[in-house]
Amino acid sequence: MKNDILCVGRRSGFSSRKLVKSQGKNCKSLNGGRLPMKRLYLMAAMGAALLATSAFAAKGGSYSVASTATPSGVSPTEIVVPLTIKYDKNLTAMDIPLSYSDGVTLTRVELGSMLDNYDFKIANIDAENNLLIIGAINMIYSLKADLPAGEGTVAQLFFTVDDPTLESFTIEVAPQKNPTHDLFLVYDVYDENNIPHVVMVTPEFAPIEVALSGGTSVASAKPTSFSLDQNFPNPFNPSTKINYDILNAGLVKLEIYNVLGQRVRILVNEHKEAASYTVEWDGRDNNGGKVSSGVYFYKVNANNGEFVQTRKMVMLK
């Protein structure tokens, strides 16, 4: 794939700023500046990216957008599908245009806490045409750090099942025009003069098949690795959901601890098949009492230590 870089031209004013596509050429910075101009540079580049241009693909790296946890049934007719992203470079922005098949209605989208620090974020639903646009830019109003490389839940998609005979539905990428939206993630690279350049990558995306059975959805594909996602929402009150993947069948424990290391709640303690799962914590301890505000930790242990991971969450009241 071709590695394309966007550079900011020298004309002042956002509405007239030129974007120059460069291949191997150095880009001139505004007023001879470097990092102080990063905000304007990102505004121009991403304003064009989210509103008027196509994505440019970059070589190398590992990036994906998928649903890596089991969609859950909120009610007999409502399904929640977690949308996750994985990326190996710090992210500055993203554009994720999606469509979904007939028989369901996308009623709302809850953006993940991983985007809390972003200045600009959207989740635009076009229910008439079964379309969704998720977009985010990390800094517009002030200089901010990029999203650290890793993975996380970018959004929870809430669907209502309209057709009681529906057995499954599909979510897939849907590039759009007027304005243009293409699936891409954005990160910065710095040249030998320490001038930043925007690079857009097209992540992997396989259509998400959501199978329905008795009002409960089931993941259609076996996970490719163990994983424990960040809870959503976080901070939370009064409840939160935790998604996790089990690669190999066996005993799975998922427990909640307080900052003193005391076990507060056992959420899961049973044999699990290789699959993706979602469990909800209602903010109560093993005795049914409501826990106090503060920091808590949730820990998964699969197959007697084959996979162990702990994450932090915050209860607010």
Image (cartoon, helix red, strand yellow):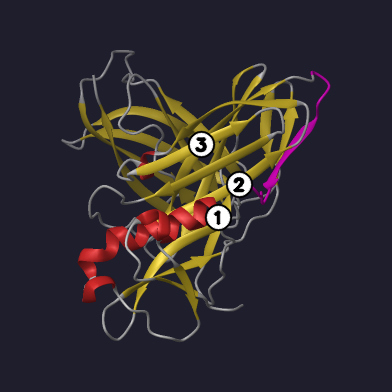
SS label for mark 1? loop
Could you say which quadrant of the image residue 112 lies in? Answer: top left
> What percent of the width, then of the height, locates residue 1?
61, 77
Of 240 and 123, nearer the camera is: 123
The residue tagged 1 is 52
Of 245 and 307, nearer the camera is: 245
| Eye-nearest disc, 2 or 1 | 1
Distance between the alpha carbons at the discs numbered 3 and 2 = 10 Å
Distance between the alpha carbons at the discs numbered 3 and 1 = 18 Å
> What percent of the width, then of the height, locates residue 181?
59, 51
Tag shown at residue 123: 3
Residue drawn at point x = 49 percent, y = 57 percent: 48
Q: Which residue type does callout 1 highlight?
A: Ala
Q: Is residue 114 above or below residue 197?
A: above
Residue drawn at point x = 46 percent, y = 86 percent: 24
| Eye-nearest disc, 3 or 1 | 1
The magenta region covers 164-179
> What percent of the width, then of the height, locates residue 220?
71, 43
Single out the residue that lies furthest toward the right. Answer: 165
The residue tagged 2 is 97
Q: Which residue type does callout 3 highlight?
A: Ala
Main SS category, magenta section: loop
Residue drawn at point x = 20 percent, y = 37 percent: 261
Q: Magenta stretch containing residue 255, yes or no? A: no
Residue drawn at point x = 74 percent, y = 19 percent: 162
Q: Is residue 268 above or below residue 293?
A: below
First in sequence: mark 2 or mark 1?
1
SS label for mark 2? strand
Q: Which residue type does callout 2 highlight?
A: Pro
Q: Is residue 86 above or below residue 3?
A: above
Q: Is residue 292 left or right of residue 229?
A: left
